[in-house]
Image: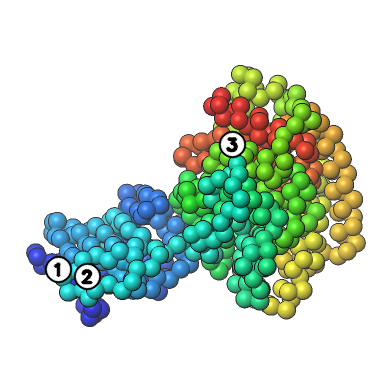
């Protein structure tokens, strides 16, 4: 039998079935080593295996394996006591008390004896670490308490608060999760890349967008994770792991505003301040059932924000309600006035809708038809956009984005080879191949696309799916995620090309229970108009 830690007491009034403790300690060793294949092998196969914690309940071995596939943090805690209750000859309940410094936790597992496989976990629940100690008969007096651990896939640093409000105002008591691209006074910018963070100095002042929120009564809860240099849509950071998605626990969070989105969805923040270059607010909003606004390009200054592609980089935010989003808009965009662009018609583009998967497309079609039939949206008109023209625009968008991304970060990446994950690293490697002549040609196409799209958007709201599908599974292959990314980018690039505001609303619910968003894209300057329209839609729904 595998040796148990000497500090661990085992309490088993009815005895311990043969092989159970050996299986438990193999499981514990796999947890400490982050040995995912071993962990998967020790969980009962099939659709009824359970794993839960304070954030989500996962049902089925595949969902649990998908959640675990993005697990990056290796725990440092130790098991200090085991309690075993035998339920039947082939079933036993195991409660493991754990300690990590001053913090304690509890793992509860139902083990079943499977033919030919030995003891396997059929159900597990993990209580998140707490600074309060369990009372153990032989335990020494506890050391001074420390704050409960925070999820490092979501947060880089948190405070109580990290930065307080600098004045009272309309955002009083709202907590903000700031994407790790913004200057936050007293802290360096990490950009989702540990090697980059290591070379940065603390900022002496906060970015204007952060300062404006603090001046309106909001406080900064913490600095939240982003995909590496914000050059991704999945939220799967190779260094820090994937933030949880409480709306789809076995799915990715969506990026690159991944940490702020998860913080808002988990209720740990009211506002997720982020950026959107090619969908980095709208996609996580769609995947997690949030309200996500990409503002008109340049309407909120990007000063003090680490760039990716300045031609398209836009400040925006995620919230759980339209009302909160509108309150933030009144602070960062200024109050709405009578000069807001009017919206008289709804535009649909079949060539774009066809990029969505079957479930999203069906739900989107039904929802938009209902909203236009009832008058919640203006009358709909279908417009033709040739597929080859969309592809030309998309190629130009990607070329300019890649060129500008390499101008922003290429020198540093060249000087620090091997520091990026395979997906983002591969993207930057392709960006390095774009020539200045190619970029100039693409910029001309972007200018033409911007002119045509703005003409189409005059007096209109374009409705389209926020993403091609719901959140891909965490266990999805890189090829699967890349295929979702390619289809989604052909949708999301339209707002970037037009320099226009786009608002993702959680109006779709798919057959498997995952959320998906409907995106409202309006003419430049129509940010408040879209939020007013969204408030009416929210009331209608």
Residue bearing the label numbered 1:
11
Measured as percent of width and height from the top left, residue 32 is found at 37, 73
Q: Earlier in the sequence, mark 1 or mark 2?
A: 1
- Secondary element under disc 3, as helix, strand or loop, is helix
The mark tally for this picture is 3
Position of the N terminus, as image quadrant, is: bottom left
- In the image, which is nearer the foreground, mark 2 or mark 3? 3
Q: Which of the labelled discs sits on residue 81, or is there none?
A: 2
Q: Earlier in the sequence, mark 3 or mark 1?
A: 1
Please give the name of the residue rendered at 55% of the width and 45% of the height, measured from the top-left corner: 172
Q: Residues within 10 Å of mark 3 (few under 14, many from 20)?
A: many
Q: CA distance from mark 3 to mark 1?
A: 53 Å
- In the image, which is nearer the foreground, mark 3 or mark 1? 3
Q: Is residue 217 visible?
A: yes
* 127 relative position to 362: left or right: left
Please give the name of the residue rendered at 69% of the width and 45% of the height, measured from the top-left corner: 332
Residue furthest left as drawn: 14
Q: Earlier in the sequence, mark 2 or mark 3?
A: 2
Measured as percent of width and height from the top left, residue 4 is found at 24, 77
- Secondary element under disc 1, as helix, strand or loop, is strand
Which is more toward the observer, 116 or 417?
417
Q: Are marks 3 and 1 in contact (CB under 8 Å)?
A: no
Q: CA distance from mark 2 to mark 3?
A: 48 Å
Measured as percent of width and height from the top left, residue 465 is found at 64, 38
Measured as percent of width and height from the top left, residue 20 is found at 21, 68
Q: Residues within 10 Å of mark 1 (few under 14, many from 20)?
A: some
- Secondary element under disc 2, as helix, strand or loop, is strand
Residue bearing the label numbered 3:
322
Q: CA distance from mark 1 to mark 2?
A: 8 Å
Please identify the quarter of the rendering in which residue 479 is found. bottom right
Q: Are marks 1 and 2 in contact (CB under 8 Å)?
A: yes
Please identify the quarter of the rendering in which residue 388 is found. top right
């Amino acid at each position: 039998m595998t040796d148990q830690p000497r500090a661990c007491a085992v309490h088993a009034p009815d005895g311990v079935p043969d092989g159970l403790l050996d299986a438990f300690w193999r499981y514990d060793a796999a947890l400490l080593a982050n040995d995912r294949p071993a962990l998967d092998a020790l969980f009962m196969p099939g659709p009824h295996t359970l794993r839960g914690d304070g954030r989500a309940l996962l049902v089925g071995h595949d969902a649990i394996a998908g959640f675990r596939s993005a697990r990056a943090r290796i725990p440092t805690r130790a098991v200090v006591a085991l309690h075993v209750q035998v339920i039947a000859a082939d079933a036993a309940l195991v409660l493991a008390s754990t300690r990590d410094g001053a913090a304690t936790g509890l793992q509860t597992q139902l083990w079943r004896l499977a033919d030919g496989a030995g003891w396997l976990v059929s159900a597990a629940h993990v209580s998140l670490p707490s600074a309060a100690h369990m009372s153990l008969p032989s335990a020494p007096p506890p050391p001074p308490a420390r704050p409960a651990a925070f999820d490092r896939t979501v947060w880089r640093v948190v405070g109580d608060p990290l930065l307080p409000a600098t004045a009272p105002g309309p955002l009083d008591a709202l907590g903000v999760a700031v994407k790790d691209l913004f200057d936050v006074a007293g802290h360096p910018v990490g950009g989702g890349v540990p090697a980059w963070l290591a070379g940065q100095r603390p900022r002496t002042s906060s970015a204007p967008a952060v300062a404006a929120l603090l001046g309106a009564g909001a406080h900064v809860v913490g600095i939240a994770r982003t995909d590496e240099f914000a050059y991704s849509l999945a939220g799967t950071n190779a260094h820090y792991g994937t933030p949880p998605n409480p709306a789809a626990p076995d799915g990715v969070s969506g990026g690159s505003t991944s940490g702020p989105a998860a913080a808002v969805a988990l209720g740990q923040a009211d506002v997720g301040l982020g950026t959107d270059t090619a969908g980095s607010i709208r996609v996580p909003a769609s995947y997690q059932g949030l309200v996500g606004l990409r503002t008109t390009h340049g309407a909120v200054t990007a000063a003090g924000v680490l760039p990716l592609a300045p031609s398209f980089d836009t400040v925006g935010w995620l919230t759980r309600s339209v009302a909160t989003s509108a309150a933030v808009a009144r602070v960062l965009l200024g109050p709405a006035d009578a000069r807001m662009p009017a919206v008289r018609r709804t535009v649909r583009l079949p060539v774009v809708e066809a990029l969505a998967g079957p479930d999203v497309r069906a739900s989107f079609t039904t929802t938009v038809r209902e909203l236009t039939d009832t008058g919640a949206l203006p009358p709909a008109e279908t417009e033709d956009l040739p597929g080859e023209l969309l592809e030309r625009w998309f190629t130009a968008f990607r070329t300019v984005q890649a060129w500008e991304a390499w101008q922003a970060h290429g020198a540093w990446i060249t000087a620090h080879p091997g520091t990026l994950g395979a997906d983002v690293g591969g993207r930057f490697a392709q960006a390095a191949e774009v020539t200045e002549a190619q970029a100039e040609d693409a910029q001309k196409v972007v200018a033409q696309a911007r002119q045509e799209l703005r003409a189409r958007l005059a007096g209109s709201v374009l409705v389209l799916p926020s993403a091609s599908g719901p959140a891909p599974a965490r266990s999805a292959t890189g090829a699967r995620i890349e295929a979702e990314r390619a289809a989604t980018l052909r949708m999301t690039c339209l707002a970037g090309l037009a320099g226009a505001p786009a608002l993702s609303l959680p109006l779709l619910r798919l057959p498997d229970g995952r959320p998906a968003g409907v995106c409202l894209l309006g003419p430049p300057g129509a940010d408040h108009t879209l939020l007013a329209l969204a408030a009416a839609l929210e009331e209608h729904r």
